[in-house]
Image (cartoon, grey):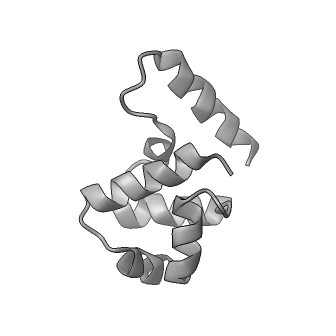
Amino acid sequence: MNVALGLRIRALRRLKRVTQQELAKRIGISATLLSYMERGLRKPTPKMLEEIALKLDVPREELFIIRGSADDSENAAFSGRIALY
C-alpha cells in the first residue's frame, strides 16, 4: 500500500480528533488493523475506505489528496489511481 494514503487517513483522523480505537470501532475493524493501514503495512479494502470517509465525515476523494504538494497534478494522478481499487 502507498504510505501516503495511510498518512492521509491518520491526518484526517487526528484533524477530526478521533482516536484509532474510536475509528476502528466505528468501521468495524481492530485498532491494530487501522494502525497497520495508517503505517502503510496493510491495504484497506474499497469498503473500508468508504467507511473511513463516512465516519470521518469527509468526501472519499479527500482521502487521496496530498496536502502541501507543490504540484497539483500529483494529486490528480494519485486520485486517478484509486479508481483501480
**Residue 57 shows in this picture:** no
In the image, taking residue 68 as reference, residue 8 lies left or right, namely right
> Residue at position x 36%, y 80% from top?
22
Residue 46 picture location, percent across and down:
65, 58
Of residues 47 and 65, the one nearer the viewer is 65
Residue 52 picture location, percent across and down:
47, 63
Quadrant location of residue 82? Answer: top right
Q: Is residue 56 above or below residue 23?
A: above
> Residue at position x 53%, y 71% from top?
34
Residue 68 picture location, percent across and down:
36, 28
Of residues 54 and 38, the one nearer the viewer is 38
**Residue 47 shows in this picture:** yes
> Residue at position x 43%, y 43% from top?
62
Residue 55 picture location, percent across and down:
39, 67
> Residue at position x 54%, y 44% from top?
4
Quadrant location of residue 30? Answer: bottom right
In the image, taking residue 20 as reference, residue 18 lies left or right, namely left
In the image, taking residue 45 as reference, residue 16 lies left or right, namely left
Label count reads 0
